[in-house]
Amino acid sequence: MKMNQGVEWALHCCVNMAWLPGDASISSARLAELYKLPPAYLNKQLQALVRAGILVSVSGPKGGFQLARRPDRITVLDVVVAIEGREMAFRCDGILKNGPGGEMDEDYARSCLISQSMRHAELAWRTELARQTVAGIAQSIERRFPEARPNTVAHLLGTGSAG
């Protein structure tokens, strides 16, 4: 399964925002600078997260984006769906109806064993993504790379540089 690169960008940004203190917000330009990403395209991804209720947009001189809810309430699946949409990866077109013995009124999306196998795999994938939260990823990063959080926060808030 191939996903839009915006999924990766959005997940990293959510983790970074989970690390920010209190009600701090961060601009899309600052996040783009951190990862050397095209600011306009990153902003499109962040706006998709706003529409999905994952982020809020804060206006004003210290405005930008911040998480709309606690990071333990934002799943990886929430972010994937916000960027990629709700449509399933596999779409059964019911081509069996065109084959020998095919029936025009049969719901092959439900009866085709290939369709069932693909849907079962997607359900397992979505279930796993729904089990993982932004908070869980942030904590795992902190355990494995203890300097990641302080370096990232210092860079984003302009109090130092990310190393």
Image (cartoon, helix red, strand yellow):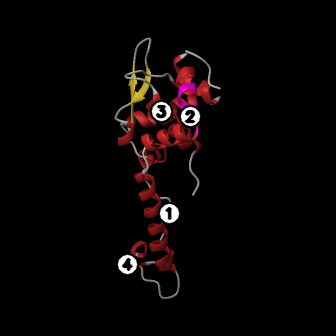
- How packed is label 2: few (under 14 Cα within 10 Å), some, or many (20 or more)? few
Q: For marks 1 and 4, give the CA distance.
A: 21 Å
In the image, what residue type sits under mark 2? Pro
Q: In the rendered image, is residue 38 in sight?
A: no
Q: Is residue 13 above or below residue 108?
A: above
- How packed is label 1: few (under 14 Cα within 10 Å), some, or many (20 or more)? few
124 sits to left or right of 53:
right
Using the image, tell me which numbered label, if any, was put on residue 90: 1
Q: Which residue is mark 3?
A: 46
Q: For marks 3 and 1, give the CA distance.
A: 26 Å
Q: Earlier in the sequence, mark 2 or mark 4?
A: 4
Q: Which residue is mark 4?
A: 105
Q: Which residue is mark 2?
A: 146
In the image, what residue type sits under mark 3? Leu
In the image, what residue type sits under mark 4? Asp
Q: Earlier in the sequence, mark 3 or mark 4?
A: 3
- Magenta residues span 145-151
From the image, state whether disc 2 or disc 3 is nearer to you: 2
